[in-house]
Amino acid sequence: MGDETWRSRILVDPAVHHGDPCIRGTRVPVAVIVGSVADGDSIEEVLRDYPSVTREDVRAAMKFAAEAVSGFDFIPLPTGS
């Protein structure tokens, strides 16, 4: 999935779900989709739980999340002595 494809599926609009990134045409936040997959839900489970979301939307949400953290600098927490 190229950038132009996933970008066309994600909407950030202050009038929709407080400006959280959502799947275009829905009020389903990207964070909910990514969180469900991270919690172990299969794509089929996500599609069942959110019937307005397509398989391509789930892939777009994952690409969005990957790009959002791609430049993130990890600062390790100090370990206990």
Image (spheres, grey):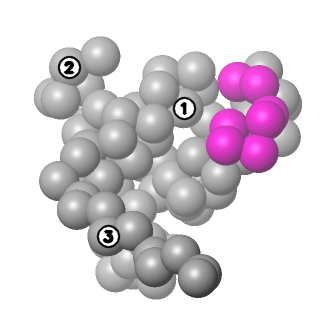
| Residue with the mark numbered 3 | 75
Check the picture and name the quadrant holding the N terminus: top left
Q: Is residue 39 above or below residue 48?
A: below
Can you tell which of label 3 and label 1 is closer to the viewer?
3
Magenta segment, which residues?
37-43
Q: Amino acid at mark 1?
A: Val
Question: Is 26 or 61 nearer to us in this picture?
Answer: 61
Give the percent coordinates (x, y) of residue 74. Answer: 31, 62
> What secondary structure is marked by label 1?
helix
Check the picture and name the quadrant holding the C terminus: bottom right
Q: Are marks 3 and 1 in contact (CB under 8 Å)?
A: no
Q: Which label's residue is closer to the chain start, 3 or 1?
A: 1
Give the percent coordinates (x, y) of residue 23. Answer: 47, 48
Q: Is residue 25 above or below residue 81?
A: above
Give the percent coordinates (x, y) of residue 54. Answer: 59, 26
The numbered mark at residue 10 is none
Q: Which label's residue is closer to the chain start, 2 or 3?
A: 2
Q: Amino acid at mark 3?
A: Ile
Q: Are marks 2 and 1 in contact (CB under 8 Å)?
A: no
**Quadrant in the rendering for residue 3:** top left
Question: Is 42 or 71 nearer to us in this picture?
Answer: 71
| Residue with the mark numbered 1 | 58
Give neighbour class at mark 2: few <14, some 14-19, many 20+ (Cα, 10 Å).
few
| Residue with the mark numbered 2 | 2
In the image, taking residue 12 as reference, residue 47 lies left or right, namely: right
The residues tagged by marks 2 and 1 sit, at their Cα atoms, a distance apart of 14 Å
